[in-house]
């Protein structure tokens, strides 16, 4: 006999197994496991459609309604086989537009509409929360089935409320650990996907095992099984064409619109070609998982006591025949069905809530610009984690309040109908350019309200939310508004009635609203990009030339996607434009690419709003509108060529303008150098002449004065020597005649030597080292590299204007390279001067205040070039920041 304690132990062991799989997949060596991105794993992840409602409920459905349960599987099968082009279009749009959810997809299509994102998110929360409660209900019912049999074994029954609570808590913990490890949801959660694939296999094996046992061990073979089916009430089931077609449509629509399905099918897709395999493999999976539904239902009706719950036949039949091992396997199959749905649904809904509700509120409450307080990356991650916990808690609360009654048992089809209200806006958006956000929003709201009035609220029962009088006579006695008989049409099945009226009004209002309103330019651009997704696949560009600073955009990007990824993107963009450093020109193409990168983390609508807040809004050029409106291929090609030439000319003009500005600045620097070098030479020589003349002519000087004058002569001579050494050093480096003593050295030792040589901490500069790769070794000339570090530390000591000067030294392991950042807390270098500071004789402060001739950074640049590395100014760090980068020892040898 299986005790409840043993059952809980097996359940915990299974959860530990899922944790182990997820940890192993996302641990070291992840890149070598290419099978994680295989079509098989992708197909199995789509089994998230098969929840506990289909695992347990399909058998109960068959026992009550005959073959009507088949509609649950026919809907997605027809979508995968007949509507494959829709799925391919969705996957392509998801990758090109960096879609994060169903709300993001629809809001991005309709001009990055924040309103639509909020509407779709609220619908998802309403439709998903009761469905999560259904999963918790299935787990507690399965525990109850074992508890009823094994109560005598451990002296008591299982506390179902406690079981539901701890199940919800464990699922919340798992989802937070593996669903919010990174911010960019376009990065696949491979640990979660692998766990879902494992659960897909477990629930398929469980149903097949129970089915084989029922057919061969209980019924006595296929022939006897067919005889039992002929004698069963299921054989007398009568087809209701209206309900049959409605349920097929509903299942197919839900497969396209459920947040969890969009998440695994679009967001977690690693390769578009995997969809071709899934188009036949997933229907095969559905066929196998439904193969023994009727035999299990028939045997359950035949052998189980009258009044037994048919939803639990998968469990109670093995228990009745004392096959505890098989019953345990069936329990794990149902547990897998419930947990996989809850995990993915929570991730999807949490992403939608953070991107379309939390972030818009945060942006409205924050000050304009990129310098808003707090770390946006942490705000998004924390909001998603809190939302996951809240969604699981709401599911548990719904479970407690509903009491597991009939309303909860029917919630599967009710949730499907709610999710399907998104379908007209979705299909219209990817096939019709004329669809507008006004029409989409009006249609979604209309359909959702009719669904809630005709199906969702009445599902709580008579007197639950709607009184019996309103159900019978309508509100205020208006019979045409009766929830289950709109416009006086009686006799329809409640589900059919609700689906037909909600979809008719939803689609009608969507079409009328779109025809009567004109799309904005950005809507038309996004419409063209979505409708032509299988053609060019490019996104719409809706930004104009902006005066916003690239450094301000970099600060914002770093706070969302992280410093390394943002800096790499900005550096690559600058290189594409022919510029050095991290600050590209803020062109429309650059803003478009930056928006798509941010959209992967916070959603398209929020990313667009954030950029618009900094740049002052977006606009669309006449050429872009002509490109959208004109369908002639010849004009399209000509316009594309003109645009390409315009971009090239603009890039060349920017390069010439930059070069001219640099030449002008160098000319000014040359004049300043002539003045400065004459001053630097004349001042010490004048002092030397004056004091040496005093020493030579004055015989009556006191010994202490003679010593002081000799010290002045010595210090001024050393000053001259340093200047001449710097000039000679720079000349040797520029001519390439320098000899380098290359050998391996630990980066930690070089930094320590530089700190000791400068005596930074004794001079009042507080130095903090953040070690991320100090144990790495580089192939370099340690003395020359130390010279570079000494110069950077000395500059921070001289020029940091903070009241309490601080210097952070941060080491990064970049794979084949090592970078060391020197970041102070001063005002930093202005953007217009960042390209000039590495030129000879260039200094931003007063030339006489700090001493020297401004050769330090020019010498550092030449040294790093000879060492095969780089030194650059790093903007957007809140102070002066320089990054030194050079190859690791192994990479340099290769």
Image: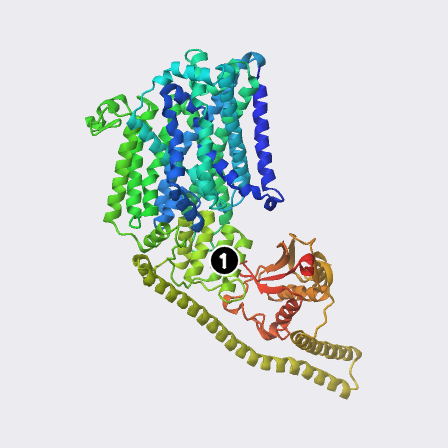
Does 440 sit left or right of 575 as displayed? left
Q: Secondary structure at mark 1?
A: helix
Q: Quadrant of the N terminus?
A: top right
Quick one: label 1, few (<14), some, or many (20+) residues within 10 Å? many
Residue 42 lies, in percent from the top left, at 50, 39
Q: Is residue 543 shown above or below 834?
A: above
Residue 348 at x, y percent in the picture: 45, 39
Number of on-image labels: 1
In this rendering, position of residue 244 left or right of residue 371:
left
| Residue 160 visible in rendering | no
Q: Residue 785 falls in which quadrant of the image?
A: bottom right
Quadrant assignment, res 669: bottom right
Name the residue at 31% across, 45% down: 428
Q: Residue furthest front?
A: 223
Residue tagged 1: 554
Colour scheme: rainbow
Residue 345 as seen in the image, left or right of residue 19? left
Image location of residue 689, percent across then percent down: 71, 85
Q: Is residue 468 above or below residue 876?
A: above
Residue 534: x and y, percent? 39, 50
Task: For residue 686, say whether it is visible.
Answer: yes
Above or below residue 374? Residue 251 is above
Quick one: quadrant of the C terminus? Answer: bottom right
Look at the picture and state if 851 lies above or below 531: below
What residue is drawn where x is 64% and y is 79%? 680
Residue sitting nearer the eye, 346 or 694: 346
């Amino acid at each position: 006999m299986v005790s409840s304690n043993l059952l809980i132990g097996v359940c915990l062991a299974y959860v530990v197994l899922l944790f182990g799989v997820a940890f192993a997949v996302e641990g070291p060596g992840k890149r070598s496991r290419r099978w994680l991105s295989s079509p098989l794993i992708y197909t199995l992840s789509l089994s998230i459609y098969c929840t506990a409602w289909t695992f347990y409920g399909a058998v109960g459905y068959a026992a009550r309604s005959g073959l009507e349960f088949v509609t649950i599987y026919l809907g997605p099968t027809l979508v995968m086989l007949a509507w494959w082009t829709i799925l391919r279009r969705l996957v392509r749009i998801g990758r090109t537009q960096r879609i994060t959810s169903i709300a993001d997809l629809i809001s991005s299509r309709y001009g990055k509409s924040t309103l639509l994102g909020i509407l779709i998110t609220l619908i998802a929360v309403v439709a998903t929360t009761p469905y999560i409660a259904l999963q918790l209900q299935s787990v507690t019912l399965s525990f109850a089935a074992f508890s009823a049999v094994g109560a005598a074994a451990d002296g008591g029954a299982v506390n179902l409320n406690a079981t539901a609570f701890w199940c919800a808590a464990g699922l919340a913990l798992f989802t937070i650990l593996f669903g919010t490890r990174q911010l960019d949801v376009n990065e696949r959660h491979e640990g979660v996907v692998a766990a879902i694939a494992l659960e897909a296999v477990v629930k398929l094996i469980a149903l097949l095992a129970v089915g084989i046992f029922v057919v061969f061990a209980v019924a006595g073979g296929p022939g006897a099984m067919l005889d039992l089916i002929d004698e069963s009430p299921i054989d007398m089931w009568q087809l209701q064409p209206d309900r049959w077609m409605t349920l097929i449509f509903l299942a197919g629509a839900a497969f396209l619109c459920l947040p969890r399905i969009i998440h695994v099918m679009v967001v977690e897709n690693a390769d578009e070609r995997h969809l071709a395999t899934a188009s036949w493999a997933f229907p095969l999976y559905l066929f196998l998982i439904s193969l023994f539904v009727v035999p299990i239902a028939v045997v359950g009706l035949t052998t189980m006591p009258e009044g037994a719950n048919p939803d639990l036949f998968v469990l109670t039949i093995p228990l009745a025949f004392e096959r505890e091992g098989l019953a345990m396997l069936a329990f794990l199959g149902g547990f897998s069905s419930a947990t996989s749905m809850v995990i993915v649904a929570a991730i999807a809904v949490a992403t939608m809530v953070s991107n379309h509700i939390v972030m818009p509120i945060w942006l409205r409450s924050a000050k304009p610009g990129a310098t808003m307080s707090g770390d946006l990356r942490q705000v998004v991650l924390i909001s998603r984690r809190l939302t996951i916990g809240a969604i699981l808690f709401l599911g548990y609360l719904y479970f407690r309040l509903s009491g597991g009654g009939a309303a909860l048992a029917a919630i599967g089809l009710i949730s499907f109908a709610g999710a399907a209200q998104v379908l007209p806006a979705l299909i219209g958006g990817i096939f019709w350019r004329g669809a507008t956000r006004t029409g989409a929003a009006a249609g979604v709201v209309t359909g959702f309200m009719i669904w809630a009035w005709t199906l969702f609220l009445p599902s709580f029962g008579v007197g639950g939310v709607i009184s019996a009088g309103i159900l019978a006579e309508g509100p205020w006695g208006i019979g045409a508004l009766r929830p289950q008989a709109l416009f006086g049409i009686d006799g329809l099945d409640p589900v059919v009635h609700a689906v037909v009226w909600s979809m008719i009004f939803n689609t009608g209002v969507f079409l009328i609203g779109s025809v009567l309103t004109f799309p904005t330019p950005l809507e038309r651009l996004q419409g063209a990009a979505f409708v032509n997704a299988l053609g060019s696949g490019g996104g719409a560009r809706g930004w104009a030339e902006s005066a916003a600073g690239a450094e301000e955009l970099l600060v914002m990007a770093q706070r969302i996607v992280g410093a390394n990824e943002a800096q790499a993107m900005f550096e690559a963009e600058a290189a594409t434009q022919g510029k050095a450093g991290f600050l590209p020109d803020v062109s429309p193409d650059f803003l478009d690419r930056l928006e798509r990168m941010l959209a992967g983390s916070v959603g398209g609508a929020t990313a667009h709003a954030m950029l618009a807040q900094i740049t002052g809004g977006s606009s669309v050029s006449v050429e872009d509108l002509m490109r959208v409106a004109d369908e002639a291929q010849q004009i399209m090609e000509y316009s594309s060529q003109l645009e390409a030439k315009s971009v090239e000319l603009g890039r060349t003009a920017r390069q010439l303008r930059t070069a001219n500005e640099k030449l002008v600045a160098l000319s000014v620097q040359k004049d300043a150098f002539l003045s400065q070098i004459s001053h630097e030479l004349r001042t010490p020589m004048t002092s030397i002449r004056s004091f040496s003349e005093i020493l030579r002519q004055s015989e009556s000087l006191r010994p202490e004065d003679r010593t002081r004058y000799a010290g002045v002569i010595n210090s001024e001579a050393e000053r001259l020597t340093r200047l001449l050494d710097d000039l000679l050093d720079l000349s040797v480096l520029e001519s390439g005649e320098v000899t380098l003593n290359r050998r391996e050295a630990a980066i930690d030792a070089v930094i320590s030597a530089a700190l000791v040589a400068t005596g930074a901490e004794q001079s009042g500069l507080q130095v903090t080292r953040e070690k991320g790769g100090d144990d790495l070794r580089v192939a370099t000339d340690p003395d020359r590299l130390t010279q570079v570090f000494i110069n950077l530390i000395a500059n921070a000591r001289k020029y940091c204007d903070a009241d309490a000067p601080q210097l952070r030294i941060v080491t990064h392991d970049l794979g084949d390279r090592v970078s060391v950042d020197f970041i102070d807390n001063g005002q930093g270098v202005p953007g217009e001067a960042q390209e000039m500071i590495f030129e000879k004789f260039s200094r931003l402060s007063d030339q006489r205040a700090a001493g020297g001739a401004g050769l330090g950074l020019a010498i550092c640049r030449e040294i790093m070039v000879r060492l095969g590395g780089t030194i650059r100014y790093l903007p957007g760090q809140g102070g002066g920041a320089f990054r030194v980068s050079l190859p690791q020892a192994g990479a340099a040898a290769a």
